[in-house]
Image: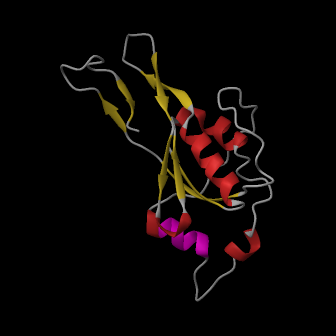
Amino acid sequence: MHLVFMPYGIKNMLDFVIEDLNHKYLPLRLYKEGEEDKYLLTQTQIRMLPFGLYELVFPKEFMNEVFSALKIDDNIPYKSELNKKFMGFTPIKLLQKFLKLKPIPEYKQVKHPNFPIPEFKTYVPFIPIGIREDSGMTEPKGSKFEGWKHEAI
């Protein structure tokens, strides 16, 4: 799963937060019919996009934990301005269309023991833009996990 957001704030804190998000590890679920699920530890990824946007890539099973940890819907800064129409478009919808994103889905607020982050919301708020879901894939013949399926991160 990909979460696209726009962080802003004090430069050194913003750099710290982005670097911290890039150093997280979460288990990726591998499954095969008739077999017990396996988990492979995978590193989250941060990608830079145009217009000061960032993309966080992580396993979809952790959506609730990641969104809760990042406080993705708590007092979104500039929410009213981003939802105003300019020349018939709202900025968020325009960015979602340009980047082929879906709106942020409803999620369950949970504690986040598998995704610990420092308390930074005061210094680096996020403006969530949207999500992109990955398709599934099957490991090819000859690989260590031949025939196992997982999210194509």
Q: Is residue 143 magenta?
A: no
Residue 6: x, y in percent? 61, 61
Residue 56: x, y in percent? 53, 47
Q: How is the image coloured?
A: secondary structure
- Extreme residue in the bottom direction: 87
Q: Residue at x 64, y 39 (%)?
A: 66
The quadrant of the picture occupied by the C terminus is: top left
Q: How many marks?
A: 0
Answer left or right for 146 relative to 70. left
Q: Is residue 95 magenta?
A: yes
Residue 29: x, y in percent? 47, 24
Is the residue 50 above or below the residue 64 in the image? below
Magenta stretch, overall SS:
helix
- Extreme residue in the top direction: 35
Is the residue 72 above or below the residue 77 in the image? above
Q: Quadrant of residue 68?
A: top right
- Extreme residue in the front direction: 12
Answer left or right for 79 relative to 132. right
Depth check: 48 or 109 in front?
48
Q: Residue at x 65, y 32 (%)?
A: 115
Instruction: Give the residues in magenta.
Output: 91-97
Q: Residue at x 65, y 27 (%)?
A: 114
Q: Residue at x 44, y 10 (%)?
A: 36
Answer left or right for 141 relative to 20. left
